Amino acid sequence: MHDKIQESYHDSQDIYDDVLTQDKWWSELYIDLFWDGVDDNQIARKILGWIPDNFNGRLLDVPVGTAVFTCHKYARMKKARITCLDYSLDMLRQADRRLSELSQVRTMQGDVGDLPFADGDFDVVLSMNGFHVFPDKARAFSEINRVLKRNGVFIACFYVQGESAVTDLLVSQILAKKGWFTPPFLTVEILREQLMKHYEIKRFCTEGTMAYFCAVKK
């Protein structure tokens, strides 16, 4: 499964940013037709706005992807200590190019299911467009919870199943088979239940087939 994920993101590295940012006419059409017109740019602005620019703690970004949404935000977070981790080396190379001049940021290859950090290492964990890719979602939740400090903040956004029949069909018949997404997928109800076991939910929003939230570890 991990090899399939590596291969899928290697194959899509040249179009990944265009799809997320809707920077091309075809990517905007794709989002309108298959993703209910969800604007990833707007969601990214909202959730990154939950982290103050003067934040001076430790932040883990997993997966960092290409850092297309976070590079400008991190440039303003000069007091923070930011670790950006991704399983895909192709994604990581692009993130490196965007973040290489930021002394407060380090990038590294790694697996969210086996994070190379001590318990309670981070004040914030950010996970953008990651959970629908992670093969072992229960393990990913467990590891993120482990490396967060008590009262640490978990911020994330990702695809949820059951909100659009068209999107669900696209995901199950194409994206999952190509390795870009990995079942099983969470529904809104299951996600809420999962979070409430270990977190106090401060914000929880859905837009089309995307859920995004800010939760504090109990």
Image (cartoon, rainbow, N blue to C red):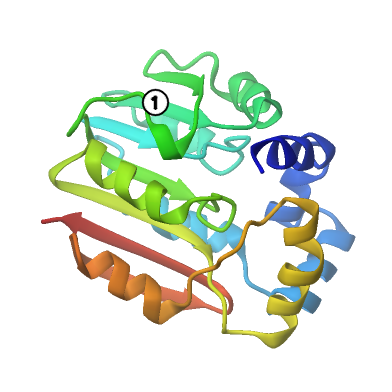
Residue type at the position of mark 1: Thr
**Camera-side residue: 41 or 213?**
213
Query: Quick check: 115 left or right of 20?
Result: left
The residue pinned by badge 1 equals: 83
**Camera-side residue: 142 or 59?**
142
For the point 64% across and 31% down, the residue is: 88
Looking at the picture, how far across and down is residue 150, in whole percent?
Answer: 10, 45
Query: Quick check: 69 left or right of 81?
Result: right
**Camera-side residue: 150 or 33?**
150
Residue 51 seen in the figure: no
For the point 66% across and 32% down, the residue is: 91
Residue sticking out furthest to the front: 1
Q: In the rendered image of this protein, does residue 216 appear above or below residue 75?
A: below
Looking at the picture, how far across and down is residue 71, in whole percent?
Answer: 53, 33
**Camera-side residue: 155 or 161?**
161
Q: In the rendered image of this protein, does residue 4 appear above or below residue 81?
A: below
Displayed quadrant of residue 190 = bottom left
